[in-house]
Every structure is written in C-alpha cells, then in structure tokens.
Amino acid sequence: MAESSCLPLVVLLLAAAAAAAPDLARQLDLFDPARAASDAASTNVTVPCAQAMAAFADGLATHQDWAAKMFDASGRYSTGFLWGNNFWLGSSDLCMTLEENAVVPAVFSVARFSLDVPRITAKTRTVHVGMCLPRACGLEDLRVLVGAGLTQLEQRNATLEAVRSPQLDEYRFYADGTFVVLALVCALVLALMVAGSIVDARKPPPPAAPATPECEDGSVGKPPIALDVVPAPKRKMALSAFLVCFSVQRNARAIFDQSVGGDTLAPIHGLRFLSMVWVILGHSCIVIFKYADNTDFRGVVEREFLFQTISNAAFSVDTFFFISGLLFSFLYFRTTAKVDLNKITKATGLKSKGLQFFGLLAYRFGRLTAPYMFVLGVVQVSMRWFYHKSVFEPPTLDHENCPQYWWRNLLYINTLFPVKDMCMLWSWYLADDTQFYVLGALLMMVAVERFRTAALVFGGLMFSSWCTTAYIAFNNDHNPSMDDPLALFDKIYDKPWTRLGPYLVGMATGWLLFTMNCRLRLGKGGAALGWSVCAAVMLSLLYGLYDAQLDAYTSAAYSSLSHTAWALGTAWVIVACSTGHGGFVGRLLSAPSLYPMSRVTYCAYLIHPLIIRMMVMYVDSPLHLARTTVMLLFLGHVVLSYLIAFAISVSFEAPVVALLRLISPKKE
C-alpha cells in the first residue's frame, strides 16, 4: 500500500519536470535563425536583406548544406543557463567558412540581451547570442530581425541592448595611428639593437668584476644605484658607447647573470618572482571566470579552503610595495654612507637636496617609462582590435580610456582619478609605487640629517594610513570575510593613502638591514621563534577569514592593518634570509636560477594581463571552467608572459638602464 500511495506523487513530479523543461526553453528562446528567415518579409528590413533571408529560408526548407551550416553556426539556449552560461555564441569560425563559399554569403554577429526571468532566477542576466545570417543584412537589419522575433512573455522581460558584427566592422589595426607609431618605434629600436650588437661583438670582452658581499658594496664594476640618479657632469658620449647600450648579447648577459647584483639582495630575487607568479594566478582567474560558460563554478570553488590563496592574492602586491621600499631605503642609506653627494651635485644645503630629489625622480621616470609607454600603446591597439573584431566584449574600456587619459599614466597619477577612466587597470600599482617613491625620497633625505624628525613623520604617515583605511571600510560596510577583494577598488584597493603601510615597512626594513650590515646574531631558538610567528601571521592572513564572521569594527580593523601585517611577515623573511637564518626558504629565494626571471618581472607585470586576455578573446567560444583547465591556462600565462617580457626587457628596459648608467657620474 505504501508503494502504491507514493506512485501518484512520483507521477506528478515527473509531469512537473516534463512541463518545466519546455517552459525553460521557451523562456530562454531569444533568437531563432529559422524564425528570423520566415519573418523577414513582414519586417522593415532592406530589400537585399529580405531577398537573402528568403533564400536562406528556402535553403532550410530544401535541406541545403550551406543553409544547415548557417543555422547550426548561430547560437541559442541549449544547457547550462542555471550554471552561469551567458554566452550562446554558436561558431563564428563555421560561419566564416560560409562568407564566400555559400549560395548566400554569411556574416557573424553577436546580440547582447538583458534578460529578466523571475520564475527561473532572481538575477537579471546579460546574455550574448551569436547569429550567422546573410551578409546582405546590415547591422540595422539585424536589429530589426532580432527585435521582431523577440516575443514578450508574461514571466519574461528581454531587451535587446546591442548588435555588433566583427566581420562587418571596418577597423584595420594597420591604419591605427598608435600602431603606426609603435611600428616606427620598433623599427628604430630594432635598428639600434642590430647596430649595438655589431659594435659590441667587435669589442674585447670586459674584465670580470671581483665578487663582493652584497650587503657591503655589491656595486663593484658599476656605480651605486643611488648615484645613478643625480645629475651628471657634462661630458661627451661616444657613439659606440651609446650603441652598445642596445646590444642584445650584452643585455641578455646582464639578465642571465648569476651574480646577485649591486642593486638588490639575493632573497629579493626569489620573492619578486614568486610574487609575480601569484599575481598572474589571481589575474588569470579573474579573466577566465568572466569568459566561461559555467561562471557559477566560481561560487563552488570559492567556498573551498585552498581557494583563499587566490582570493587573497592582493597580498602579493603588498610584497611588491615592501620590496620597493626596502631596496630604495637600503641602497640610499648605503650610498650616502659611502659617498658625499654634495661633491656629486657640486652644491650644498637645499640646492644639493633639490638636485638629489629631482635626480632621483628623473632616474625613476627614465627607468620605468620606456617599457611602460610601449606596452600601453600595445594594450590600446590590442583592446581596440578586440572591441571591433572579437566575439567577446573587452573586460575594460582601454580602447576608449587609453587614447584619452594616457597622460595620467605617463605622470603616474592615474590612481587619483576614478577607476572607470583608468587606462591599463593594473597600472594602478605603478602609480602608487611612484607616489610612494616621491614620499620616500623626501623622508630619507630628511632622515640623513634629522632622523628623529623623519621618524615622527614616518609614524604619522603610517598611523594616518591605518585610520583612513579603517574609516573608509567602516563607512562603506566593507566586510573582507564576505566581500570580493576588489569590491571597493575605487575607494580602498588602488588608493595610495590606503596602501602606504607595506612600503613604509619596507623602508624601515631597508634601514634596519643597512644599520646592522646584514648581520644578526640569533640562536636557533630565536630563529625558530621568528619563523613560527611569521608563519602564524601570514597563514592567518591568507586563510584566517575562511568561514569567519566579522562585525563592522573588526572588519574595519582588519582592512586597515592586514596589509601592514603581511609586510611585517615579509620583513622577517628577508631579514632572516639576508642574515643567514633563512634555512631552506633562504636557499630557495636566493637560488641563482630565479635571478633572470626576477630581472624581467617588471616587464612581465606590464604584459601579463594582455597575454591573459588574448588567450581568452581570440577564440570563438567561451571556456568551460575546471580546476585542471584553469591551472593549465595559468601555467601557459606564466611561460608566455615571461618569454615576451624578456623580449621587451632586452629591447626597451635594459637599454634604458644601460644608458642611465652611462650618463651617471662615477665615484671619485
């Protein structure tokens, strides 16, 4: 009796499921090429379009192969809508084969809809539908055809937002003014590289520089880094010396040199490279998740414990800020202790300080800007091409913002403006770091003569940054345990007054390493305690918010202090590894095999988001997310980013560094 009583319930459930399936398909029926072909005659399309659509309808009715392919190349709802599939694109590649070889030439277009289906999902979705239709139909004809077939249902609100066609778009990148400038610059640089390589090949090899401890005077054979940034006395530069700065073999040797170098510390190399890999991992996930046919998979993996490694990848940028502050402070104090900068500037007092300050800025600007502006131009042309030619819409408005606001990037002030107007969104780090560099230069010049005053200002800046961040987080109800890390990008994430802490910690660490000359007497127990505290702090920052519930005050405190706490943990890593207490970690971070990757990390940072976008937007269909897919794509992004970064570094970064050293004054 029990089994027979359950039978009607099972039948009812099966009937409901059977009824729901066609209803779902009907609610999500946004475009049907066969329906468009049959309705074309009754719509207000052009005569050529109406005739072509009639031929398409006849081809479908008579089972013509070209018409079947045209129908098959168009996108439509199939499955996965409730799993986050918003790209019903069909196949633009298949449609392009019909561009010339069909009875009716075809063209591929993409329609973007705003879809609200409350009986299926509470969210308003943006859906992209691919359309392979006769080429005789222009964009306005396509809008009419799509609009005519978009029947309004009682429980559905669908709106056509835009129609665009990569094939009908007349954009040609070689006619773009920016591309022409880039081509001329590349031709000039290539000519200089060829000439420099020939001149360098004819010169005798330079004598090997003797090895010296990196914390004492690792600058043998080249001027200290801080001296590279003060005004040089006038002297003639030989043409051959200028050309050799562009020598490929010389710059490649410098990149692959297995010595630490006089402008860094050994563990910095490994830390910089590993942090860059972490940045690429975070950016890969952000872009890949956007262009997937199962975007709700992200919500599943985000609930996993180890995904906190990706969601907290913002700490990798704090590591970069820390490294920048540390090296600037360490090298500046080391140089001022060994060299009288008044003799270099041939001035005293405020005039000498002013010359030092503007020399520092000039070096920084020259050092960073050449590869930066080159990549910015490449990004502008690439994103403009994607906007016109890809079946996907670009993730940001670089094709509009870069031509209009590139000067903000050039001046490194783009984080002082709204994020919606930013060109190269990831360049926010360069702007903040340069602004910190200016502030750090002023602080260190004061510290050389009035250390207590500089220390008071240092503490005031740190405290004010904490308070400002806490205030903004509290007023905006920011909850770091629940919100997306980029949720308040324009208010907290990219603003210099909220990200200053790690840079200041780096400056303090650099001063500490200088004062103790990279020597620290510490027993095994003390070292073990230091590493234990460091691991506890950094692991709690990475994974401590998993399933945590924070109130408003705790959230504000965490937002305020977490970045500085991460920098303090990183400070212990560098201090321990630089003073002989690093153990396995020290050997890993100081491995000579990581030095080349570290030296091209700046260029890798510049180019890697473009590599990620290209690998996604060049295809004609969305990705299907899976753990192995994401990891394989990520590894490909790392390898390709560093290969291209090496080419950019040899062409634009290393020659500028060599030129700056060529014109810098030498130690008397």
Image: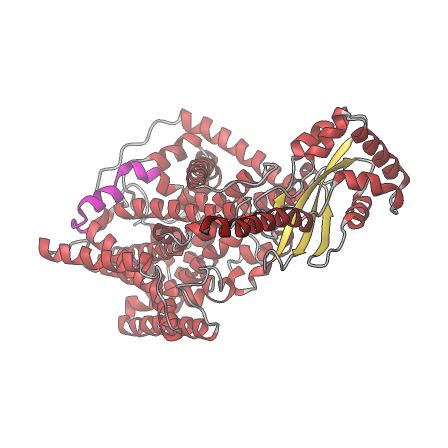
Who's the residue at 38% across and 56% down the image? 312
Q: Is residue 436 magenta?
A: no
Q: Is residue 357 above or below residue 88?
A: below
- The answer to whether any part of residue 258 appears in the image is yes
Which image quadrant for residue 327? Answer: bottom left
- The answer to whether any part of residue 84 appears in the image is no
Residue 119, horizontal then vertical, whole percent: 62, 58
Q: Is residue 618 above or below residue 461?
A: above
- The reply, left or right, for residue 25 in relation to residue 146 is left
Residue 480, horizontal then vertical, whole percent: 40, 64
Who's the residue at 45% across and 46% down the image? 605
Task: Count all numbered tags in the image, as a single digit.
Answer: 0
Who's the residue at 59% across and 37% down the image? 618
Which image quadrant for residue 101? Answer: top right
Q: Nearer the viewer, residue 303 or 632?
A: 303
- The reply, left or right, for residue 110 in relation to residue 229 is right
Q: Nearer the viewer, residue 535 or 380?
A: 535
Q: Nearer the viewer, residue 541 or 75?
A: 75
Residue 338, horizontal then vertical, whole percent: 25, 55
Which image quadrant for residue 70? Answer: top right
Residue 49, horizontal then vertical, whole percent: 85, 38
Region rendered in magenta: 579-596
Q: Is residue 3 above or below residue 202?
A: below
Residue at the extreme front of the image, as rendered = 1
Colour convention of the picture: secondary structure
Looking at the magenta stretch, what is its main secondary structure? helix
- The reply, left or right, for residue 519 in relation to residue 570 is left
Q: Is residue 587 magenta?
A: yes
